[in-house]
Amino acid sequence: AEVGQSHPHESAILHVLGSATYADDVTELHGTLHAALGLSQQAHASFTQIDLAAVRASAGVVAVFTAADIAGVNDCGPILHDDPVFADGLVQYVGQPLFVVVADTHDNARRAARLAQVDYTVLPAHLTAASAHAAKSYVLPPMRLQRGDFQRKFAAAPHHATGTLSVGGQEQFYLEGQIAYAIPKENRAMLVLCSTQHPSEMQHVVAHVLGLQSHHVTVECRRMGGGFGGKESQSALWAAAAALSAAALQRPVKLRADRDDDMLVTGKRHCFDYDYAVGYDDDGRIVAAKVEMVLRAGYSADLSGPVATRAICHVDNAYYLSDVDLSAVCAKTNTQSNTAFRGFGGPQGALAIEYAIDEIARTLGRDALDIRRLNFYGDSGRDTTPYGQQLDDNVIHALVAELDDSSQYRQRRVAVNAFNASSPLLKKGLAITPVKFGIAFNVNHLNQAGALVHVYVDGSVLVNHGGTEMGQGIHTKVMQVVAQELGIALAHVRVTATDTSKIANTSATAASTGADLNGKAAQDAARQIRDRLATFAAGQYGVPASEVRFADGRVLVAGQSLAFADVVAKAYLARVQLWSDGFYATPGLHWDAASMTGHPFSYYAYGAAVSEVLVDTLTGEWKLLRADALYDAGQSLNPAIDIGQVEGAFIQGMGWLTTEELCWNKDGKLTTHAPSTYKIPTVSDCPEDFRVKLFTNRNVSDSIHRSKAVGEPPLLLPFSVFFAIRDAVSSVGGHRIHPPLHAPATSEEILNAIEAVQLAAGAV
Ligand code: MTE
Ligand code: LUZ
Ligand code: MOS
């Protein structure tokens, strides 16, 4: 069987050799020009004129295009159409594109882009979510989900945990930056090679901007050097600017963002400010929970609506919350328009309840694991989430029990306490945190996918599907599914670049659903071909088609074992159709946006992690000593790839909660726009002792081979790192005080928290 095996990533060798082609590696066509964007220097200002004389006069410049040069609509935003390609009379953040300059070389384009003079009239700006929230300036209407009677239950509760919390945003930091290479084709058509998670959306945006129909535009993506959500909607600007230049000049134009421009222009993970109020009983059982969330949306809506929805739908995390009042507002700030990032609001939602539970545990003097367990959803399958979905696949009890055991959490708790008792300056911390994550797009119609499978006369197979490869291994998994269906070895199956002229109207590869959706669509296509081959082979021997088997590259029929390729060759001569399309739409989903109730998820993925840290209380520096993670990938399609996803997401989530800090100056300019100032984790930040395992399980839901999604949920596993740091900080005050530790827990933040604990404990 090809499914369930740890096959290497289909491009692993090419990645290592450096011969995998990314958009910028495709051999440039003769006459290719290079573009750069001219960016706003003001956070909020109106303008009437852009003086481009110096730009045009700069070395190598061929042309400059502004909003006035757009033949179609000046819009590249998803959902709500509030994102102009180029600012037209109004800039809303420092870094907003004003124009594109096209030159003979990339460097000449970049040099010229800085030479514009704009007659800005500066307007007041909201640079923080709090300031926008205070002015009730939002990009979308507020959202609220209520169940039961929060007020009454909270008032009646014997204990209360209330407070505020904030968590920072996060730059996607894909290693390959945003890039689009637009190539004019005959009769107004346009081909765009684009690093994007969403080729169909790029096609539609380019068509609108150029004033063409969708059938004029083809978008292709062989692979991305990472997307992480940042190329779900926001690759559109780059595709549109390259395409409109190429259309006007009738020359190929490449627009490749430098790291600084990429970070200045594009949106990031939403930072959140929370107000929480949780009522609980003497045992630590939560009886009422209220969480108010303020998201920094940035200047436009982008995907903030679905992000806020997912945040609200993940406040419960793995806990049964009977009476809740959950709300979110998307503050309109004069900063980059925040967008999708691995987890898509889910991590931010769940962090709030974990923080409150940590506080409950310290107040009651109990191990936080006990409080977590007490509040877990039951195993009965009857509990419902705050939004009304019945939880029929809960495995959190068994999963956490296994991890508790395998990580020796209890013994290590004793050891950590003993260490801290004899170590005045270096303090250890330990924490275990659970994850439950809903799988499906929370926008219903996006849960569909298509595929095309070709079986050639020599028996080799070419697969095309709507999903995009960003390093996560979707192509490998889809190849495995097709190979399994046809009973052939993986070596006979190839996947080609994602291409809008092959599969129409695809969804973004996002919400962790790529392999789920496209795997099913490819299986559907392969099955149709297999059934035709079975009918053909059965007909040759006068047996029923249902008795034909496909395995190990052989077709077993009427006691004969025939080579797959031979059957294919014979079927071709008999004029059997050897290719097929396939389609899949996830069944059973519904959602009522007004009441925020329904059945938005196909199933849930579960996990848990234990982290142990060592904190230097004099400097706030820390180290992750050991991490144990257990993740429920159902019946994993490819355990090696899934373990890689868990490891990557863990480290990425750890960066979000600790070292990655976005800073804007008083003028609204992002000052952390390069790796020199923005600290993502490196190999030296990974724990030397890192034990990642997949939990033995089988999806209750009829997913592709009963596997579960893996792309995003493990990003929540490093909550355990954050709470281990909080545990170490709290040890300074004998664990009785819960320090106000905001995320990211930078060394500075950790030092501040230590000081707060020392003050509260009267130790200073
Ligand atoms: N893994 C790698 N290597 N690179 C990426 O950009 N993106 C993540 C995750 N894993 C990403 C990744 C995000 S945000 C999502 S939604 C999923 O992959 C998308 O792919 P899938 O649905 O096929 O899992
Ligand atoms: N919903 C979701 C979405 O849950 N995840 C996504 O990535 C997404 N993208 C667009 C719209 N809804
Ligand atoms: Mo992932 S944030 O859904 O692209």
Image (cartoon, rainbow, N blue to C red):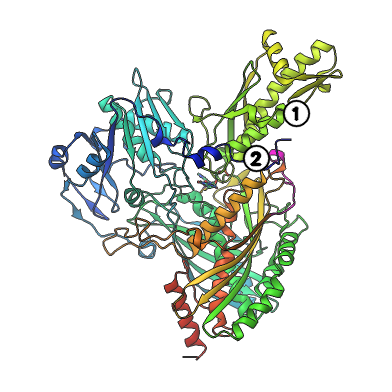
Is 162 a magenta residue? Answer: no
Q: Is residue 72 above or below residue 651?
A: above
Q: Which residue is mark 2?
A: 7
Residue 366: image location, x then y, percent:
67, 78
How many marks do you count on the picture? 2
Answer above or below: position of 40 versus 526.
below
The magenta span reads 694-705
Q: Is 449 placed left or right of 704 in the picture? A: left
Image location (x, y in percent) of residue 39: 26, 47
Closest to the observer, 502 or 258: 258
**Residue at the spot x=51%, y=55% of the render?**
345
Between discs 2 and 1, the one toward the N terminus: 2
Question: x, y percentage for residue 121?
Answer: 18, 54
Q: Residues within 10 Å of mark 1 (few under 14, many from 20)?
A: some
Residue 554: quarter of image: top right
Placement of 250 over or under 129, stated as above or below:
above
Residue 544: image location, x then y, percent: 84, 17
Q: Which residue is mark 1?
A: 552
The secondary structure making up most of the magenta span is loop
Q: Is residue 191 visible?
A: yes
Helix, strand or loop status at disc 2? loop
